[in-house]
Image: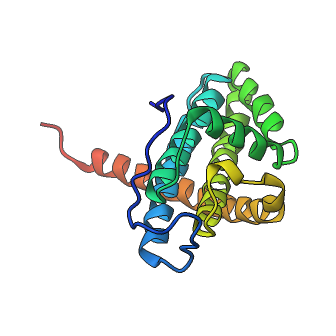
């Protein structure tokens, strides 16, 4: 659950306020691992057959990711400001958020609607979460904070990261399918007790 009060920064590595930390490999790797965890969480939630509830949950997951990245980089965080910045970032996705809401509503149509939603929504939500996380990492590594993130300066970067995120989300989905297939095969090959 995301706390509503401001969270005091607890950086992994202490840096002077406003100092760029780009090139701090350990910090970047920790941040990337956090982003991957939240990408997987949003993909899993988007597969839940509850329309619109899934998108609300995804927003909360992304907000939690921003909170954790803020803590990692020692940046102040507030739920209200984080929500505002996420809404502003969603606007840079050129209608994707509205399209995702429409696809989420398709889950109301049994069979075909659910299949269409599950075909694209997990990849889109995973890619969006990846792009949002990468924006915050870039901004924080350049010495920025939640207070001074200008979403318009990240328009090209977010589009690039969204494309990278789609590739990674498709790969993660494929790996999950293969693991499920292997688990099913292993379960069938075990003799009944």
Q: Quadrant of residue 145?
A: bottom right
Q: Is residue 103 above or below residue 120?
A: above
* Side of 111 relative to 78 (left or right): right
Q: How is the image coloured?
A: rainbow
The residue lying toward the viewer, choosing from 126 and 75, is 75
The residue lying toward the viewer, choosing from 26 and 15, is 15
The residue lying toward the viewer, choosing from 173 and 41, is 41
Image x and y of residue 155, in percent: 82, 59
Image x and y of residue 65, in percent: 52, 46
Q: Is residue 67 above or below residue 108?
A: below
Q: Is residue 178 visible?
A: no
Residue at x 82%, y 34% (from the top left corner): 98
Image x and y of residue 164, in percent: 68, 65
Image x and y of residue 48, in percent: 56, 30
Which residue is outermost to the bottom? 23
* Side of 123 relative to 11 (left or right): right
Quarter of the N terminus within the rendering: top left
Quarter of the C terminus within the rendering: top left
Which residue is outermost to the front? 16
Q: How many marks?
A: 0
Q: Is residue 25 visible?
A: yes
Which residue is outermost to the right? 94
Residue at x 78%, y 61% (from the top left corner): 154
Residue at x 63%, y 69% (from the top left corner): 142
* Side of 180 relative to 135 (left or right): left
Q: Is residue 1 above or below residue 29?
A: above
Residue at x 18%, y 44% (from the top left corner): 191
């Amino acid at each position: 659950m995301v706390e509503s009060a401001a969270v005091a920064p607890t950086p992994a590595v202490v840096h002077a306020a406003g100092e760029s930390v780009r090139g701090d490999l350990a910090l970047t790797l920790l941040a990337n691992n956090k982003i991957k965890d939240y990408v997987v969480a949003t993909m899993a939630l988007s597969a839940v057959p509850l329309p619109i509830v899934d998108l609300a949950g995804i927003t909360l997951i992304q907000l939690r990711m921003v909170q954790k990245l803020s803590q990692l980089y020692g940046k102040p965080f507030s739920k209200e400001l984080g929500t505002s910045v996420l809404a502003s970032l969603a606007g840079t996705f050129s209608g994707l958020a509205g399209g995702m809401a429409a696809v989420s509503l398709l889950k109301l149509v049994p069979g075909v609607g659910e299949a269409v939603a599950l075909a694209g929504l997990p990849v889109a939500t995973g890619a969006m979460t990846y792009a949002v996380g990468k924006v915050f990492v870039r901004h924080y590594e350049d010495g920025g904070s939640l207070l001074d993130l200008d979403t318009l300066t990240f328009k090209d970067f977010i589009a690039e990261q969204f494309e990278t995120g789609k590739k990674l989300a498709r790969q993660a989905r494929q790996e999950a399918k293969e693991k499920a297939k292997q688990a099913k095969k292993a379960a069938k090959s075990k003799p009944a007790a």
